[in-house]
Image (cartoon, grey):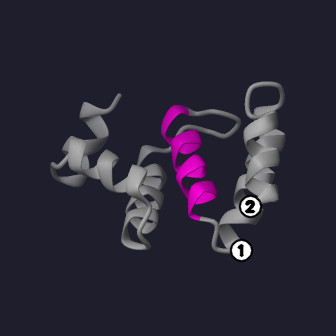
Amino acid sequence: SATNSLGVYYRDEDPAFAISFFQKAAKQGDLNALYNLAECYEKGIGIKQDKNKALTLYREAANKGHEGAKEWLNKYNFSIEAAISVHE
């Protein structure tokens, strides 16, 4: 979506501003935005790092059919705790 694209555009320049676009687009059902938001939570980009939240968002995106999220989950196919600690 255009909203997700704005988030991608601002991610490096103003990450906190980008988060607002990702959140809005994700609420509108944009799976790429949901994935991007998960990545931001995972890495602490523009928002406080929260790997549990990241994992929840990756799972949500994967369950809705996002291929990148499916790959991420397959790559770290462990328990929640192991997936979080391995991906640090």
Give the prevailing secondary structure in the magenta stretch: helix
Q: CA distance from mark 2 to mark 1?
A: 9 Å
Toward which corner of the image does residue 67 lie, by quadrant?
A: bottom left
Q: Position of residue 43 (x, y in %)?
A: 52, 32
Q: Count residues near mark 1 (Cα–Cα under 10 Å), then give few for <14, some for 14-19, many for 20+.
A: few
Toward which corner of the image does residue 18 lie, by quadrant?
A: top right
Q: Nearer the viewer, residue 7 or 55?
A: 7
Q: Is residue 74 left or right of residue 63?
A: left
User: If you read the primary sequence from the N terminus, does the residue marked by circle 2 or circle 1 appear first?
Assistant: 2
Does 35 lie within the magenta span? yes
Q: Count residues near mark 2 (Cα–Cα under 10 Å), then give few for <14, some for 14-19, many for 20+.
A: some
Q: Position of residue 40 (x, y in %)?
A: 59, 40
| 58 in relation to 86, above or below | below
Q: Which quarter of the figure is the C terminus placed in?
A: top left
Q: Residue at x 81, y 57 (%)?
A: 2
Residue 13 appears in view: yes
Question: What residue is disc 2 on?
Answer: 1
Q: Residue at x 42, y 61 (%)?
A: 56
Residue furthest left as drawn: 78
| Amino acid under disc 2 | Ser
**Mark number displayed over residue 10:** none
Q: Position of residue 36 (x, y in %)?
A: 59, 47
Q: Position of residue 31 (x, y in %)?
A: 56, 63
Q: Residue at x 67, y 40 (%)?
A: 47
Question: What residue is disc 1 on?
Answer: 28
* Range of magenta residues: 31-43
| Amino acid under disc 1 | Gln
Q: Nearer the viewer, residue 80 or 61?
A: 61
Q: Secondary structure at mark 1?
A: loop
| 57 in relation to 68, above or below | below
